[in-house]
Structure formats: structure tokens, C-alpha cells
Amino acid sequence: MAIEHKTRTQLVVEILREKILNGEIVAGQPLRQAALAEELSVSRIPVREALLQLEAEGLVTFEPHKGASATVLNAEHVDELFELRAMIEGDLLAASLEHITNDALAQAADILVNLDSALGKENAANTWSELNSEFHNCLYSGANKPQTASLVNTLNKNADRYIRMHLLWAGGISKAGPEHAELLAFCQARDINNAVAKLKQHILNSRDEIKAFLSQREAS
Amino acid sequence: MAIEHKTRTQLVVEILREKILNGEIVAGQPLRQAALAEELSVSRIPVREALLQLEAEGLVTFEPHKGASATVLNAEHVDELFELRAMIEGDLLAASLEHITNDALAQAADILVNLDSALGKENAANTWSELNSEFHNCLYSGANKPQTASLVNTLNKNADRYIRMHLLWAGGISKAGPEHAELLAFCQARDINNAVAKLKQHILNSRDEIKAFLSQREAS
DNA sequence: ATTTATTCAATTGTTTACTTTAGAAAAGAC
DNA sequence: GTCTTTTCTAAAGTAAACAATTGAATAAAT
């Protein structure tokens, strides 16, 4: 198999994205091109291109002549983001369940086992959110809607920031475990209506927990 | 008022976007950085950055070391795109009608008049699609959902390519005129359910017309 | 003392020049 | 003659140098 040559831009995107997701780069803090370039041992060009891509993903804002910074996290953003996700992912799940394979469902079940056992471990936030994405993507694998799927992944990268924050500070979305199990059961039964309803409820519940956490945090 | 300094990248984005939307740049045709740079009298860096932004908008695909090209237009793409639009714009309209002002509705009515009269004129495709966007955005102005609104605008830039193509070759979406009028009437009556249903029907009708046109075109 | 110009430094935007990659053409092996 | 290997070229990726913009600090004006 051929070695895949990643461009410096792609590497910088991945590094910066991870730093934003895990909170190492804090929201609002200016991202100086020269500083990042030196830190990562590249020139400013790949850094600029990476920042541009991250802006398209919604993780960064880029103002001409002013510079870039990680987008700020707030309650209104959560509201809109998670409602969008509930709507679009609901649609995607419905389309997927029409054609999903038993293999995909078995794989989802496997991921669920790892997901539950990830909570106590080292680096829980990172691995949990990664497995969580895998689980959901697995359930959507039958949809055959590439644009929608890629949109969902972009939205999830934004949601991920809140989910990791919440995981880190509050120990996790309390209802996620049982909700995932129930969701999978409805999917295995190909019960589209209940599966979609459960998924939307799952997303909106996490929205509520995160909003509650955020407003509590803002108060102090 | 201060003079707004647009960066070269921004200018290149606008020029290339317009060329893609109006078909001057044909789908699949490779976009050579050096050639574009010379044509627009800039260096390759702003061209690269512009291509990256257009990729984020879905108008261009960018493959490392291979180069960029305008994304290809096809029936499956239309299907997914217009269904996404129907769902998201429906949601946006519902949210908007809760708070929309009479001023916004009056403005929408004004735009509708211009829209109808634009069809016969010179450059009909460009002005029609621009006014069409304005009309829809006007109806969504009460939503207070900035992320959703910006997503809708991105999706519409993609849809615009098909709409302009159809406008140019087939003379326009046949039912658009009366549908717009009916939609506006429901909005003025603040009849959310009927307005949303009409909007979705309007979007899905244009999907059908465009798909019919595309498959007919592929045959010949 | 407050407001308006002016200078200056930090940072971004852009160009030019250099390096690397991918894919086609040419050369060699069988 | 077909298949592998090598060479070469066009294009993309990257770096380093240069130019332009912003906003703050300073100076001037009323």
C-alpha cells in the first residue's frame, strides 16, 4: 500500500482542530500566524490555509487584517446547533434505516461496548467523543447521502467542543448510556419512527444538560 | 464612511464564484492556479486561498497535489441538496414567522414584483436568482438563527448553479411565480403550517423540474 | 483637557523564488 | 511486444522576503 503524503496544511488543520476541541486553545484567544508557524515548524502559508479551513468548519473566525481566533462557546450557539443536529441527523437516520446492513448494526453494538467502558479511563473525553461519533456514523451508514453526512460531521465537530467540555467538568452526559442502548434496539428492530424520536430526544437531552451546565458556569 | 479594503483573496473568491455559478467555468474542468493567477493579475496564494474557500462552499473540489475543479452537477446531488433545503428552510421559515415584522413582509412583496418583471430582461438568470435569494432571506429574517441562515445561504449557492442553468435553458421554474405569491400570502396571514408546507412544496417542485431537465439533457 | 493628526510597531496580506509530488514519456528488461 | 524501471516535466506545496493595514502611542491643535 502506498504511503499517503499529507500536506503540511492538512497536518496543521488536524493539530489545531484537536487543540480547539480539547480546549488547549481557548475561545476568543487570538491565533497569531507567526507564533503558530514557529511552534509547528512550518511557514505562515500552511497556517493561514489551515485557519481558513477551520473557519469553514465553524471552529475559527477569521477577520481580514485582524486575525483569527477560536469561536466562542455560548448558550444560544448550543441551542441552534443541537436543534439543527436533531433535525438533520433524524432525517439521516430515517434514510439509513431503510437500507442499513446487519453488519453495520453489529459494528455499532461493538462500539457501544467500548463507549461504556471508556468513561472511567485516561483521556476519557477524547476517546468517548471519538467513539460517540463512530457509533452515530455507523447508524447513518445506510443513508447514501454524502452531502448530508458530511454536513452532520461538520456540525458534530462543533458540538464536540461542548460535549468534551461537559464530559470533562461534569463527568458526562448522564443519560447517554441508556439512550444509546435504546436507540440501537429500535434500529435493530428497524422501527424508524421510534428510532428517530429517540435520537432526537437524545440530542436534545444533551443540549439541555450542556445548557444547564453553561448557564451555571456563567453565573460563577 | 470608511472605505472597505477587500483582500485579493476575497475578490478572487467573488470572481470565481460568479464564474462557476453562471457556467463560465464548466464543471470538472481543472482550475490551474498559475493560469487563474495570471488572468486575475494576482499571485498564486490568493488563488489557492480562494479555491479553499470555494471548496468549503461546495462549489469546488480540491485534491492535494492534483488540483481543483468545479464540482460536477448531477441528479443525485440535486436530490439530496434540494431535500436538505426543504427541511432546513422549512424549519427556518417556521421560526421566522413567530417574530417577523410587517416591514419585512412588505419588503418581500416589493421584491416579488421585481422578480416577476426580471424574467424577460437581459441577464435574466443572474438577476432572477439574486432576487429569489433576497425574497427567501427576507422571509427568514425573523428567525434569529444565524448559523442556520448561513448554512441555508451556502446550500443556496449550490442550488443556484442548477437554478440558473435551468433558467437559461428552459426559461425558468414554471410554477415559481404563483408559488411565491401563495407563500407570501400564507406568511402575511402568519399561517405557519401552510406557509411551511407551501415552501417545501415549492423547493421540491423546483427539484423535480431540474431533475427532469437534467435527465433529459443526459440522454442527448 | 479634549479632540484631532501623526508616527510607529505589530501583524496580516501578497509576491517571488524554491522544493516536492504526481503522472506521463522514455528507456530498459524479459 | 509487454511489463517494469527510470527520467523528466508540469503543477502543486512551501518558505522567505516584501508590502499594506490596523490600532495604539505620541504629538499637535483648539
Image (tube, coloured by chain):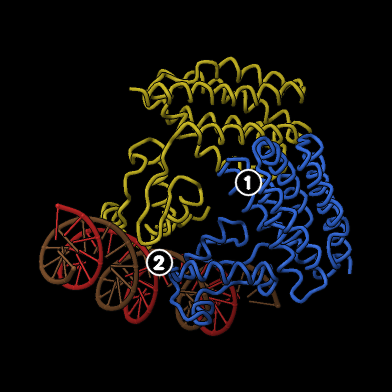
Chain colours: A yellow, B blue, C red, D brown
**Badge 1 sits on which subunit?**
B
Q: Secondary structure at mark 1?
A: loop
According to the picture, the residue beneath numbered tag 2 turns out to be B2
Residue A183 in the image: x percent, y percent? Answer: 66, 21
- Residue at image point 54% right, 26% down: A207
Q: Is residue C3 above or below residue A169?
A: below
According to the picture, the residue beneath numbered tag 1 turns out to be B141
Regarding residue A146, the answer to whether it shows in the image is no
Side (left or right) of D15 relative to A49: left
Residue A191 in the image: x percent, y percent? Answer: 77, 22
Q: Is residue A139 above or below residue B22?
A: above
Q: Is residue B110 above or below residue A191?
A: below
Q: Quadrant of residue B143?
A: top right
Amino acid type assigned to the residue bearing label 2 in the image: Ala
Decide: few, some or many residues near mark 1? Use Cα within 10 Å; few <14, some 14-19, many ≥20. many
Decide: few, some or many residues near mark 2? Use Cα within 10 Å; few <14, some 14-19, many ≥20. few
